[in-house]
């Protein structure tokens, strides 16, 4: 059981999975920078969220921006869309849908699946039910994929929640680890992964002296 001060945003789990340093810059140092991807992504989520709005869909209804919380995991956040289907034979069925601005990638990157499964686990606790899978919707390609919330993925969510909480408690921003992810990251100019990395700085000065 966690107090409100100890709650971790679900979105922080996705950011940490993508890059621990990025998560620290965003949630601890409150830094932010936009690029075309983040602007498009915000537009997609603004359309999806509209907190608490309920709409009829074939076979049931959906709720946008449903607020979520898990006291067991110490998580808080909101789901883009939650679909509730009324099935007289098999009972009610619930699907959590996470919207992404990009083109589809089969099952999505790990950070997408961690975020979606964390939302599902919160809703399961709130409603005392089992939700075996959710869905990722990719706005650019208009593709939607079912994503199983497997035992392994649930375990990853729990581990990541613990790591993020520990990061927030230590208040120490991790050093950069340059990778291909840096190229599409809106935080690259703030993070300065190559400039901060000591080996790259040494290599830079060596090139300057040798040149």
Image: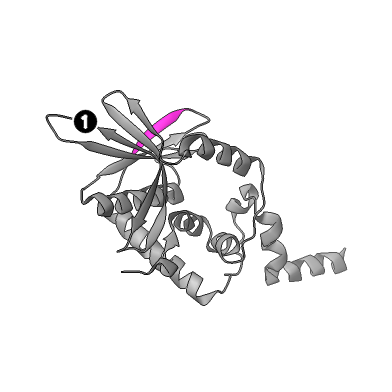
Q: Residue at x 15, y 35 (%)?
A: 91
**What residue would you read off at disc 1?**
86
Image quadrant assignment for residue 198: bottom right
| Residue at the bottom extreme, as displayed | 170
Q: Residues within 10 Å of mark 1 (few under 14, many from 20)?
A: some
- x and y, in percent, of residue 176 in the image: 61, 65
Number of marks drawn: 1
Q: Which part of the image, by quadrant, shows the N terminus?
A: bottom left
**Image: 29 above or below 119:** below
The local secondary structure at tag 1 comes to: loop
Is residue 141 or residue 131 the one in the foreground? 131
Q: Which part of the image, by quadrant, shows the C terminus?
A: bottom right
**Image: 167 above or below 36:** below
Q: Residue at x 36, y 50 (%)?
A: 119
- x and y, in percent, of residue 203 in the image: 75, 67
Is residue 85 or residue 206 the one in the foreground? 85
Residue 156 in sight: no
- x and y, in percent, of residue 50 in the image: 47, 38
Q: Residue at x 37, y 29 (%)?
A: 55
Q: Which residues are magenta?
A: 142-146
Residue 60 in sight: yes
- x and y, in percent, of residue 182 in the image: 62, 53
Is residue 181 or residue 138 the one in the foreground? 138
| Residue at the top extreme, as displayed | 58
Q: Residue at x 61, y 41 (%)?
A: 37
Q: Is 45 situated left or right of 190 in this image?
A: left
| Residue at the left extreme, as displayed | 89
Q: Is 102 situated left or right of 134 in this image?
A: right
Image quadrant assignment for residue 38: top right
Which SS does the magenta portion mostly show?
A: strand
2 within the magenta span: no
């Amino acid at each position: 059981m966690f107090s409100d001060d100890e709650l971790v945003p679900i979105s922080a789990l996705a950011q940490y999975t993508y890059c621990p340093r990025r998560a620290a810059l965003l949630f601890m140092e409150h830094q932010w920078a936009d690029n075309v991807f983040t602007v498009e992504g915000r537009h997609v989520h603004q359309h999806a969220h509209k907190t608490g709005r309920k709409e009829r869909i074939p076979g049931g209804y959906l709720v946008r921006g449903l607020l979520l919380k898990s006291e067991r995991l110490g998580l808080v956040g909101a789901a883009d869309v939650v679909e509730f289907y009324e099935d007289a034979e098999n009972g009610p069925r619930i699907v959590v849908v996470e919207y992404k601005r990009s083109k589809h990638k089969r099952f999505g990157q790990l950070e997408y699946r961690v975020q979606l499964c964390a939302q599902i686990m919160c809703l399961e606790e709130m409603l005392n039910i089992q939700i075996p899978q959710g869905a990722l919707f990719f706005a650019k390609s208009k593709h939607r994929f079912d994503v199983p919330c497997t035992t392994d993925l649930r375990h990853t969510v729990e581990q990541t929640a613990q790591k993020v909480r520990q990061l927030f408690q230590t208040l120490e921003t991790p050093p950069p680890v340059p990778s291909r992810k840096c190229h599409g990251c809106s935080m690259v100019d703030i993070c300065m992964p190559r400039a901060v990395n000591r080996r790259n700085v040494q290599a830079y000065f060596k090139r300057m002296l040798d040149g």
